[in-house]
Image (tube, rainbow, N blue to C red):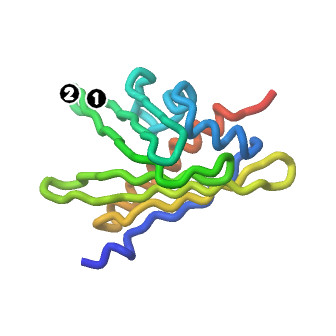
Amino acid sequence: MNTEQHVLTMIREFDAPRELVFEAFLDPDQLAAWFGPVGIDSPRDRIVVEPRVGGVWQLVMTWDEDGAPKESPIDAVITAYDPPALLVATQKAEPDAGITLLLEMRLEFEVLEGDRTRLHLTQGPFDSDEWVEMTREGWGTSFTKLDTLLVRD
């Protein structure tokens, strides 16, 4: 199976300075407010971020499915850290029973005119296009929540 084709790439622009967007990925209080697709929570007491190479980037997404509580932990290790330009983390993921993937999340933060930021996100490799599209949708709704959080007066 060639997993190289199953890599998510997204570009998203934010109406906020690069430093603020970068910090939103590291501050547990902010992560709790925006991380996870609509309808999914990331409880503050289950977020740990150690902003350095070798540090952890951990959180647990929680939701109810047919009345039963569900959760999806993200347990990543930061492998590259160059604030406020670059954050790279690697995590083990188990999308299906018996399948373990090593996923890399690469976030590059580009300065734009007018105190805006362009985020380049690359994540993968996933084991299927279905997982790429589900992850794209999740990031998309998460970024909509982040837009709201970053609104300036």
Q: Residue at x 57, y 29 (%)?
A: 30
**Badge 2 amino acid:** Ala
Q: Is residue 150 left or right of residue 96?
A: right
Q: Which quadrant holds the N terminus?
A: bottom left
Residue 68, percent across and down?
20, 27
Q: In this rendered view, identify the residue nearer to me: 55 or 69.
A: 55
Q: Give the CA distance from mark 1 to mark 2.
A: 5 Å
Secondary structure of the residue carrying tag 2 is strand
Q: Which residue is depicted at the point 70% across and 38% down? A: 20
Percent position of residue 26, x then y: 56, 37
Q: Residue at x 36, y 51 (%)?
A: 91
Quarter of the image where the C terminus is located: top right
Would you name the residue on which mark 2 appears? 68
Q: Is residue 26 left or right of residue 131?
A: right
Task: Describe residue 118's horizontal placement relative to residue 137 as left or right.
Answer: right
**Where in the figure is residue 149, as x and y percent of width and height?**
64, 31
Task: Please tell me which residue lies in front, 139 or 92.
Answer: 92
**Amino acid type of the residue that numbered disc 1 sits on in the rendered structure:** Asp
Which residue is tagged 1? Answer: 64
Image marks 1 and 2: residues in contact by CB distance under 8 Å: yes
**Mark 1 residue element:** strand
Quadrant for residue 47, please give it: top left
